[in-house]
Image: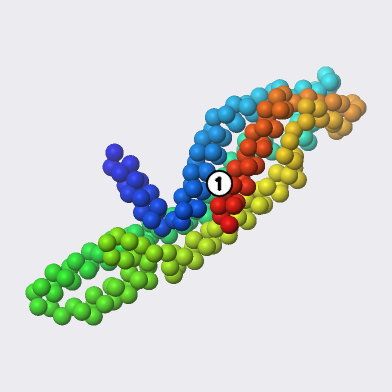
Amino acid sequence: MGDWSALGKLLDKVQAYSTAGGKVWLSVLFIFRILLLGTAVESAWGDEQSAFRCNTQQPGCENVCYDKSFPISHVRFWVLQIIFVSVPTLLYLAHVFYVMRKEEKLNKKEEELKVAQTDGVNVEMHLKQIEIKKFKYGIEEHGKVKMRGGLLRTYIISILFKSVFEVAFLLIQWYIYGFSLSAVYTCKRDPCPHQVDCFLSRPTEKTIFIIFMLVVSLVSLALNI
């Protein structure tokens, strides 16, 4: 239970360091991508290779034709996409966690100095240095935070890399197999004895999921911009 409390505290802090678009982006990522990918999409592609049939009995022909038509599974491709577009955000969250730790240390030191100040010790210079450091890290009074300095740079860089990865994966997907699936694929490749026709199961259902994931990617890209 303590671990969940710590995670909740981290997420609460992260919300304070995120823009409105960043909060919506997290919802799009976890609800529409990860949740859908782990349920409906994976079940739709569960039989993708076993149900891929070609009109030949030649051993190995179906395997090589499937490999030619789909060099990488859509599901695995989308998993890679989620990983790549999430890494910049995870790095940004690591920076947020670093700032949080700095905030805790500075607040603790500030309290110690204020206690010493009540005993007549001159600590004005040290308190001023703490205020400067808080401003540098974007820490303000009453728990308020501002995105500035290194944190702002990290956030901008994470947005740029997320946008680049989104566009790159969209282009790669378009280059490998486009944004729709055909019911019939023509294949001429060893060890197939001649040109054969191969048939894909549930192409319409899979095309609908492909278009949906495409829309989610475009929405995610728009939120980054």
Q: Nearer the viewer, residue 153 or 187?
A: 153
Badge 1 local density, few (<14 within 10 Å), some, or many (20+)?
few
Q: Is residue 198 left or right of residue 23?
A: right
Can you say whether 142 is above or below 26 in the image? below
Residue at the location (70% across, 44% down)?
173
The residue labelled by disc 1 is 83
Examine the rendering and report whether any part of residue 156 can be seen: yes
Out of 100 and 67, give the one closest to the viewer: 100
SS at badge 1: helix
Residue sitting farthest toward the right: 194
Q: Residue 25: percent from the left, percent from the top?
A: 51, 48
* Residue occupying image coordinates x 62% and y 53%: 165
- Amino acid type of the residue that numbered disc 1 sits on in the rendered structure: Ile
Res 213 quadrant in image: top right
How many numbered discs? 1
- The reply, left or right, for residue 198 in relation to residue 161 is right
Q: Does 178 sit left or right of 212 as displayed?
A: right
Please provide percent x and percent y for residue 164.
63, 56
Above-or-below relation of 81 to 66: below
Q: What's the residue at 17%, 68% (across, down)?
A: 112
Query: Can you give x and y, in whole percent of width and height, for residue 68 in the image?
Result: 78, 36
Residue at the location (67% across, 32% down)?
Answer: 208
User: In the rendered image of this protein, does residue 46 appear above or below residue 33?
Assistant: above
Q: Is residue 67 visible to the viewer in this orientation of the structure?
A: no
Where the N terminus falls, by quadrant?
A: top left
